[in-house]
Amino acid sequence: MRCFFLIFASFLAQLSTSAQVRVELSIQNEGLQGTDYVFDIYLRTLPGTSGDLYLGNADFILAFNDQNFANPDFTKVGSVPPGFCTFSPTDPSGLNALFTQYAYFNGAALSVDNGELRINLPGPSVSDQSGFDANVARIDGLALTHCLGRFKISGFSNSGGTVGLVWKPETEGELGTKVFTLANTSPFTSSKVLISDLVLVNPAGAPLPLELDNFSVRKAGNTDAHLIWSTVGEENSSHFQVERTFNFKTWQIVTTLPAVGYSSRLQEYTYLDKNVPAVPGFAPTVYYRLKMVDLDNTFEYSPIRSVSFASGKEIIVFPNPARQEVTIRIRSDREEAASARLFDAQGKQVLEQNLAIFPGVTETRVDCRHLPEGSYWIQVKGKAINFSDGLILMND
């Protein structure tokens, strides 16, 4: 009898660590680049989930209009692994995060078959707890955080056609998208995420609901943030959701503003976020983004912008997007030394420049002509300065 209870207790413990999760798979940053169609795959858990997803093996299956491609070729994007993968294990210390990204991205097997794109993940093999914590990707509920990687279909040949990329769900007798989660304690049992708990978010089949022309945030007085943005084209657009964060862990919804809906002209929007330092959890640097929502509830996020409420300081990086150079303008009440660092989409530092800051306004130009176009992260750091913001570089 004692043996039975021990076995039953062990079963219950294992069941609790492999509890079912609700998972969302989404296509982001998709678009044509010449004859190449590029897209990212993101994962996250959804509200109501009893825990995080510890990603085991998986099949990601997407259908597309292969008739609009000439000999389509399906490949990964990124000069070397881990490409655009941003996965992280429970213990990301040392090189664990990099090795985890390498294993998942490099291990993904790609194929094209009869109008379907197939990505097979073999999943990690672990034998002990330390190996599990160091090598298994841990997926939580943060949006636009856990990217499997960037992928490319080459050979688009019909300028009047569409790519038509959509997720293919699993059905009885049909190969489709499926994901397995691992229990986070030994023996690390694998269990399949139920079809009813797997949410597949398709990209919009038409152009984006709107084309964002500009988005900036400036300090207004000592306590307010002034957000200004504009669009150069809107079709079926519904509304903008203004969101902010102080720590990149929790995004707060500040307000929702209606969009014009249909327009081929420049449309300007503005919002004043009042008394920001009084918000619970306030930190001197505040980050904002726009959630741009269509009438059918498809959405896209804007680039992230920041504003500093640090006493006596104001930092602005412009223009953004930039082409050959950017200017860092710092308003300060003291003299100090600082440095500007630029990081690429994989987190690799690609540029560093020393800054000499003086009382008043100091402007420093940073030459970016040697860097390829893409998304970057700029960080300005000194004894009393800690500023960072997203930056987009474009070729002439």
Image (cartoon, helix red, strand yellow):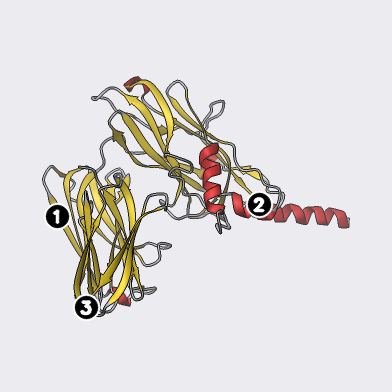
352 left or right of 200? Answer: left
Earlier residue among tags 3 and 2? 2
Residue at left 55%, top 48%?
100
200 left or right of 192? Answer: left
Q: Residue 215's quadrant in the figure?
A: bottom left
Mark identifier at residue 211? none
Kindly report the distance in space between the C-alpha atoms of the residues bearing marks 3 and 2: 52 Å
Kindly report the distance in space between the C-alpha atoms of the residues bearing marks 1 and 3: 35 Å
Q: Few, some or many C-alpha atoms within 10 Å of disc 1 (few <14, some 14-19, many ≥20)?
A: some
Q: Specify whether residue 69 is in view.
A: yes
Mark identifier at residue 359? 3
Tell which residue pokes out farthest to the right in this image.
1
SS at mark 2 in the image: helix
Q: Amino acid at mark 2?
A: Gly
User: Measured from the top left, where is residue 306 in percent x and y?
Assistant: 29, 63
Which residue is denoted by mark 2 in the rendering? 131
Earlier residue among tags 1 and 3? 1
